[in-house]
Image: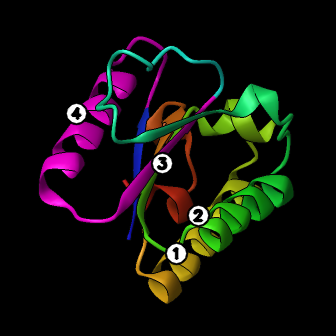
Amino acid sequence: MVKVIAGLKGSGKTKKLIDSINTAVKTESGSMVCIEKGSALTFDIDYRVRLIDASEYDIGSYTFLKGFISGLHAGNFDISHIFIDGLFKLSGTNDGEETAAFLAWCEAFGEANKMEFTISVSEDPAKLPESVTKFI
């Protein structure tokens, strides 16, 4: 399952993501990972969630992000949920078709590996293509 939290800057996306993370810790079994650019969420999320500062890895594209997620899974088959804060910042693009293709990949990868994704996107939902809004 892939869930997208979309909205403009200041609309409460990160707060919703934090709430989703902390709820998941209480209700799900398995390891959880949160990928963000920087370390702003360090004190907001449960210590049992592995927080990854993506700026240490210079991700910059959806191809790299797919490889990064695949590597995380290869290193820990117990990951049940991956949270991504600020997808456009991590990927370096806000192209609707590339984003839709990445989300479709996440959906297929998640189904194959019993993993969920919750992803925040800084964009007005009305400006996103239907191929992305179907995940909201």
Q: In which quarter of the image is the N terminus?
A: bottom left
What's the residue at 13%, 49% (across, down)?
Answer: 26
What's the residue at 33%, 41% (across, down)?
Answer: 48
Classify mark 2: residues with Cα within 10 Å, few (<14), some (14-19) or many (20+).
Answer: many
3 vs 2, front mark: 3
Query: Residue lying farthest bottom?
Result: 112
- Label 4 sits on a secondary structure element that is helix
Q: Earlier in the sequence, mark 4 or mark 3?
A: 4
What's the residue at 24%, 65% (across, down)?
Answer: 29
Taking 14 as reference, is 86 left or right? Answer: right
Q: Which of marks 2 and 1 is nearer the N terminus?
A: 1
- From the top left corner, tell me how far across and down residue 106 is, in percent: 57, 69
- From the top left corner, tell me how far across and down residue 17 is, in percent: 34, 35
Q: Mark 2 points at which residue?
A: 103
1 vs 4, front mark: 1
Q: Mark 1 points at which residue?
A: 77
Q: Mark 3 points at which residue?
A: 33
The answer to whether mark 4 and mark 3 are in CB contact below 8 A is: no
Classify mark 1: residues with Cα within 10 Å, few (<14), some (14-19) or many (20+).
Answer: few
Instruction: Look at label 3 and name its amino acid.
Output: Val
- Label 1 sits on a secondary structure element that is loop
Answer above or below: position of 84 versus 108: above
Residue 118 in sight here: no
